[in-house]
Every structure is written in C-alpha cells, then in structure tokens.
Image: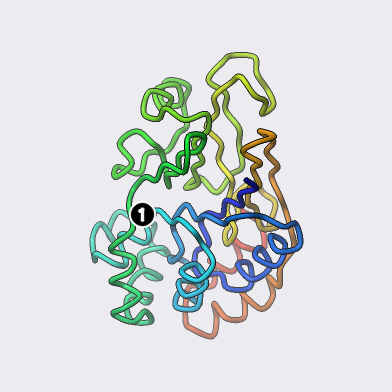
Amino acid sequence: MRLAILSDIHANLEALKAALAEVDRRGVDAIVCLGDIVGYGPDPAPCVDLVRQRCAAVVLGNHDEAVAFDRNLRYLPKDGETAARLHQTLLSEDQLAWLRTLPLRVRSGSTVTLAHAAPLNPSEWPRLDNYGLLKAQFEAFDTDVCFVGHSHRPAVVAESVGVHRVRKGHRYLIDVGSVGQPRDNDPRLSFGLFDTEAFEFEHVRAHYDLAKTSARIREVGLPAEIASRLQRGI
C-alpha cells in the first residue's frame, strides 16, 4: 500500500490543496492525517471538510483539541490562542463535533502507527527534543513505523543507533513535517509518502500559493506575524 501522511495543516487551505494535488499526481492508495487541521491559519472550515472527504484515518492534534473542546487554549502560543478562539466561531457545530470524535492514536495494519505528537502519552503533546524521550517512544508502539507531526520539522529516527535511512529490518519514528506551517527554514509544504510493501519512505516538499494564504490571514484579522512566519518557514 502506498500511503500519504499529512500533518499540521493549520487551516492553510492553499497548502492543503497543493499537497493533495501532489498526492494525486504521485498516486497513493490512502491518505492519513496526523492532526492539527485547525489553528493559526485563515481557513479552518474548508480544511476540515477536505480532510473529512479525503483522509482514511485522522488523529487529534493539540490545536484541534483546543478548538473543539475549548480546552488548554491558554497553553498555546499567543498567536495560536488568538487563532483558536477565532476558529471556534468559524467552524460549524458539526465540524466541531467531528473533531471531538478523533482518536489520539491509530494503528493502521501491522506496519504503521499514527499519532500527532508522540505515541507515548499522546494527550500530553510532548516535544521529542532529547534522546531519552525519543528512545522511550519505541516502547509505546509495536509496529515497524510510527508517524508523528507536531514539531513542524521533518525527521527520521531509527530505534537502532547508526541506521540513517529507512529500510526493512528496523523500526522508525518519522516526523513528516507540516503541510501548512513548516518550521525548518523552508517555507515549502511538507508531507510523507510510505510504501508499506517496499518499505520505502519519501519526504515530499512542494510550493503553494503562500501569497494568497498571507492575504487571507490579513483578511480574517489574524496577527500579521503568522503570515511572516510562513514566509520565513519558521
């Protein structure tokens, strides 16, 4: 099975449409989403609708939780809190109710686990920024690969020291980066492609209409810094 893994769309409709166009061009059997459909960007409602239509599996992200459950908004960055409160007014009750149904983790077949931030204690939304925390994640899933997002920075971590590329016989924690708000100094959207049979993974980068998203951010009254960060990829 060829799987496309999207994460951290953050209400960036132009980036999501471009990512889906690239997915369709490449040809896949299924699309999954690792959460944070909403938050930060200008178009939460159409992004939720597209994900519902196109994705075979979706997990809950921390911004999805904040918006849908009206919970932990104060723990978001200030711009994120502002956007989350706006998104609560832009989403329909049906869309909010759907977000509330999303699980924290999904196992997809015998090969793949999906989580937003981490497979271990996923509701705590940890940042996997040290070796000990990364190593502990492998005890929390029993598949060959666990895909995560949350950091907005693409990365591949193998359970075995010294393994630097994805290949059969090893286990991996893979961050697919962000569709809607990359933070690795590259403003292009990011997502992952994984072939479960060939056991091959690719990080995909693609351009989208960033200027249109920036204009929409200003149009809906979100902080200008959100657009500035998109342009800088931070």
Q: Which residue is mark 1?
A: 62
Q: Is 108 on the left-hand or right-hand side of 28?
A: left
Say above or below: 198 vs 48.
above
Residue 93's image quarter? bottom left
- Looking at the image, which residue is at 35% across and 56% down? 76
Residue 87's image quarter? bottom left
Q: Is 36 on the left-hand or right-hand side of 72?
A: right
Outermost residue to the top: 161
Q: Nearer the viewer, residue 176 or 102?
A: 102
- Looking at the image, which residue is at 57% across and 73% down? 13
Residue 219's image quarter? bottom right
Number of callouts:
1
Question: As shown in the figure, which amino acid type bears the numbered disc 1?
Answer: Asn
Say above or below: 87 vs 230.
below
Image quadrant containing the N terminus: top right
Q: How is the image coloured?
A: rainbow
Q: Nearer the viewer, residue 214 or 122?
A: 122
- Looking at the image, which residue is at 36% across and 54% down? 62
Residue 145 location, x and y as percent?
A: 53, 33
Residue 94 location, x and y as percent?
A: 31, 78
Outermost residue to the bottom: 219
Residue 132 location, x and y as percent?
A: 42, 20
Secondary structure beneath dot 1 equals helix
Q: Nearer the viewer, residue 129 or 111?
A: 111
- Looking at the image, which residue is at 74% across and 58% down? 206
Say above or below: 130 vs 20.
above
